[in-house]
Amino acid sequence: MKLQRKYIPLAATVSLFAAMSVFGGVSYTGFFSAQVFLNLLIDNAFLVIVAVGMTFVILSGGIDLSVGSVVALSTIVLAKLVQHLHWDLMVAIPLVLCMGTLFGAFMGWLIQRFRLQPFIVTLAGMFLARGLCYLISIDSISITDEAYTVLAQTRIHLWPEGPMVSISAVLALVVLAAAVFIAHGTQFGRTVYAIGGSEHSAVLMGLPVVHTNVAVYALSGFCAALGGVVFTFYMLSGYGLHAVGLELDAIAAVVIGGTLLSGGVGYVAGTLFGVLTLGIIQTLIMFDGSLSSWWTRIVIGALLFIFCLLQRVFEARRDG
Amino acid sequence: MSTATTPSLLTRVQTHHLLWPVVTLVLILMVNASLNPGFWMLQWRDGHLYGSVIDILNRAAPLMLVSLGMTLVIATRGIDISVGATVAISAAVAALMVGGKLVITDGVAQHISRFPMWLAIVCALLTALACGLWNGVLVAKIGLQPIIATLILMVAGRGVAQLLTDGQIVTVYYPPYFYIGSGYLWGLPFALFIAGFVYLLMHLAVTRTALGLFIQAIGINPAAARVAGVRERLISICVYAFCGLTAGIAGLIISSNVKSADGNNAGNLLELDAILAVTLGGTLLTGGRFSLAGSMIGALIIQTLTSTIYSIGVPPEINLVVKAAVVFVVMLMQSAEFRRAVRGWVVRPAAGSQA
């Protein structure tokens, strides 16, 4: 019985996703095809990666508002290195990933060392990263490097003549699998859950709270940078205005995925379904054709509201 | 910064909560004056004062208003990140209802508004109030975390604003409406009077009634305040509703100033500027200590900073980096841990004392 209750938020998200798929399949012809669903993954690969990083931060009881800007910064640094300075991909991409990780670790260090609020530190990080983008280039840099475009446009067929996925989508699934392992199979993951439950208790238990707190933001920074790399595969350009508001989508995906914002409760797998739910809303609106794009935002807001309410009900029942 | 940060100054910082904001503002103004010799020049032109300072004051008015509302929210340990969306909604409602077209009656060209202007303003403000009320109910009644409760409106609000304006930029053709954002009263921008009036009202409410004390009590310890008989939930709801209202007024000023309402961009990133202004003004993000005057000065600092960056010819995008640097400095100054660390670096422990 207890085990079941633990999975209620996750089950709610999965069934919502399933319900929306069925609704789409019944309402629109051509909706129920494997490619439509794989496109969800292809189009939202960067969001999956960023949201996975965000899940860890939220599980630890924090928040990271800088991810959207770090994605933009990564795209522009990568575009600059590859397009203007003709660096090799195998050097440029690891460098960008390192940069994102260090950026996250720096914010984590500030939060941990000086007991600052994650909200305000990552807000400053958001300004900083967005500003750095413009220092590098005000205009959009499109990437025409041959190796890069080939990599970006490669499609892997699941079976001959079957539906296909991009490298980004595969990467997103790899990140997701790694994150599930990290969350449930390592000391780091258990510590993150413990900190989210009660930081004080975690300290008293002798868990490495200091290192974990910094590492959580470093991980989120890494995921954001990787998200940025994937974003360049998707857009083939670097631009300071890329991924504006992505942090909100990521937070929304995590919340809809059933992770409690107070920290300590939630699943990385839920985040995948959170992202897919956001994606399917867009796909439904696109298939409908008569609804304008702003309905996406309104529906996402409404879903956030419903899921927050559910969370409260769930919490109240657990406490009572 | 380096050697001046001795304990004596630090203790003074703690006693004079307005010292640092004022010093920052004066510094930025001095930088401005040294870069631009005509900075302080005021001219009387077309029946009103004209000059860089007046321009800054005029442009700072919406930010001042939003910061004032935000101050009270932050004082109760909350945060409202939906003010930008509220600004967009209120601007959209006002612009749609005022509308305006040129009608020629008896050979006299006349601008006619769609609804009476007062009705449009009241409706826009009521909508904004409703937005704030919604946030307040989510936070105080349902018990969501303030960031998330207001995130809902932040995400959905822009969608609603775009829905209202049908995704278009609604242009207003009704001159009386422009008075709110670009008119002048007694030689000074009218918007400034609105901000000043709201500040005065709030100042009186906070100092002359027990409201300020209640808000402070909630910020310091909500549970204790409730036990002590403060109607914590009601006050929280009112505070969020008021924040929505101030955002609504700011929306009127902004839309009137640019003579249009853009559901997508009106009030973009305003919530971040407002939070920054409130923090700069010495209000603690952890709640409890707040300063309305500080927030007004904080808003002025941000607007002056923006104007400086524009006027000295640096690419405006650098604004963000400067703002980030300012936030980092301010939040480090507010952190007790950091002050302790700095004291450790600057002041050597006395011989024989335990480290």
Image: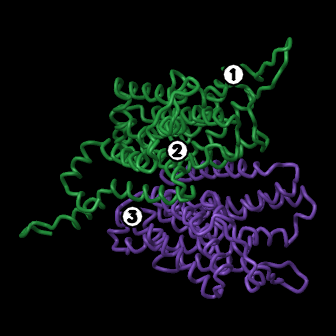
Chain colours: A purple, B green
- Mark 1 lies on a secondary structure that is helix
Give the residue number, with chain letter if any, for mark 3.
A199
- Image coords of residue A74 (percent x, y): 60, 72
Residue B65 seen anywhere in this rendered image of the structure = no
B48 relative position to A116: left or right:
right
The residue at the far front in this view is B37
Residue B175 image point, x, y percent: 70, 25
Q: Which residue is mark 1?
A: B117
Q: Which residue is mark 2?
A: B80
Q: Is residue B139 left or right of residue B112?
A: left
Query: Are dots 3 and 2 on a single chain?
Result: no
Residue mark closest to the camera, 3 vs 2: 2
* First in residue order: circle 2 vs circle 1: 2
The 10 Å Cα crowd at callout 3, few under 14, some 14 to 19, many 20 or more, is: many
When asked about the image quadrant of residue B217, the answer is: top left
Q: Quadrant of residue B346?
A: bottom left
The chain ID associated with circle 1 is: B
Q: Is residue A284 above or below residue A180?
A: above
Mark-to-mark CA distance, 2 and 1: 29 Å
Q: CA distance from mark 3 to mark 1?
A: 54 Å
Kind of residue sitting beneath label 2 = Asp
Tell me the quadrant of the picture where the N terminus of chain B can be found. bottom left
Q: Is residue A277 left or right of residue A201?
A: right
